[in-house]
Amino acid sequence: MRYMATYDMMETIRNTNQWLGASALALGSYPAVAMMPNPAFQWLRAWGEVTERAFSRMVAKPDWGIGSVVGEDGRDHLVEVKVEVPRPFGDLIHFKVQGRAEMKRRVLLVAPMSGHYATLLRSTVISLLPDCEVYITDWHNARDIPVSEGKFDIEDYTLYLVDFMKHLGPNTHVIAVCQPAPLTLAATAYLAEEDPKAQPRSLTLIGGPIDPDATPTEVTDFGNRVTMGQLEQAMIQRVGYKYKGVGRKVYPGLLQLSSFIAMNMDNHSKAFADQIQRVAKGEAGEHDRHNKFYDEYLAVMDMTAEFYLSTVERIFKGLEIARNEFTVAGKKVDIGKITDVAVKTVEGEKDDISAPGQCVAALDLCTGLPDSKKANHLEPGAGHYGIFAGKSWRTNIRPLVLDFIDANSGPRVVAGKDTEAKAG
């Protein structure tokens, strides 16, 4: 599979389906066919519209689409998406609210690098903006990164997080969502030894696979059913000539998307069939529920091969975080060295990706942290998406996280002494 031709073949198939959809839309919308009132043309137009939109979204990075936020003064304040720290494989960006004094709560959202863009957390960002100064990790699509930039694996990812935390300073509160939870925990432990003053005040881990074997799911147990050789042969391809990253080994976004859809094929098939019917009847809208969800869900990005393979081998197979055996640049990272960063875990009762038990395992690893600095929340009835962006997040979890941040925003206690943390 590790050939450019394979990558280009997948892109060709996607492009062909986009073209077929656009052609069907054009034909079904052709004015002359209106003289023949046949429902077949209405269905053809509807099928073309839905198909063309779906396949075009697969290679487009979604916009943040956050125009303004209401301030305490009751006015709308424009939001500027500003690159705070530019890096080859991902930027630290800041949602700067114009005309508003800097908020006391400084939050770093660590977005997952698991197939989708950081915009997957758009609703999470929107919910936090009125009360926080929000920063987020904006990971780049590997197909657009030249081979000359070198590799990017889980150790590089961890060091990126270390640099971002150092940049923001010790008054930061970090929230890691799903995949980056174990690496964010490791980055915090790395700082605890290398630069304690740069540690964040609190760390909230939401639905992350700290210990995938605690309660295995179909997703987290996948790595145990295949060898690394089989995984590399089946999943890794080289970027084709169309993109800047030509020749780079990646786990293609289109291949990831096919896996996502295969997990719930019946639900996705019904969703698209229903949408075609709504379009044919004139009941669909540009920003209806279907389009709003699938515009984001279908927008996928390539991961570097070394990041994907090292994640499977070291986090899921080797359980290096769960066993506290993770190393960065040859140095062992001891999670027990975290002694004054408050840690909270959030899990969803019905999470079928990172099931309850996987994330809360982080608290047992923090052996140097007093119980007063640990917290856990299990959200009843919530699935994976709901705990960071759905109804459960908005109504229950977000207020609890903000309370946790406020409770750990006072002077940092080090060696029994209160010390004011230096502003970042």
Image (tube, rainbow, N blue to C red):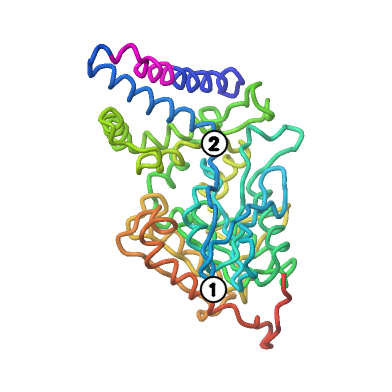
Work out how far the residue at label 1 is from the one at label 2, CA to CA, in angstroms: 40 Å
* Circle 1/circle 2 CB separation < 8 Å: no
The disc at residue 228 is: 2
Q: At numbered mark 2, what does the secondary structure look like: helix, strand or loop?
A: helix
> N-terminal of the two: label 1 or label 2?
2
The span shown in magenta is 20-34
Instruction: Kindly state the secondary structure of the residue where label 1 is placed.
Output: helix
What is the crowding at mark 1: few (fewer than 14 residues within 10 Å), some, or many (at least 20)?
Answer: many
Position above or below: 19 against 227: above
- Residue 32 covered by magenta stretch: yes
The residue nearer to you, when weighing 72 against 198, is 72
Residue drawn where x is 72% and y is 63% of the image: 166
Q: Position of residue 32 (x, y in %)?
A: 33, 11
Quadrant in which the N terminus is drawn: top right
Q: Residue drawn 59% across and 17% down?
A: 5
Callout count? 2
Quarter of the picture holding the C terminus: bottom right
**Disc marking residue 405:** 1
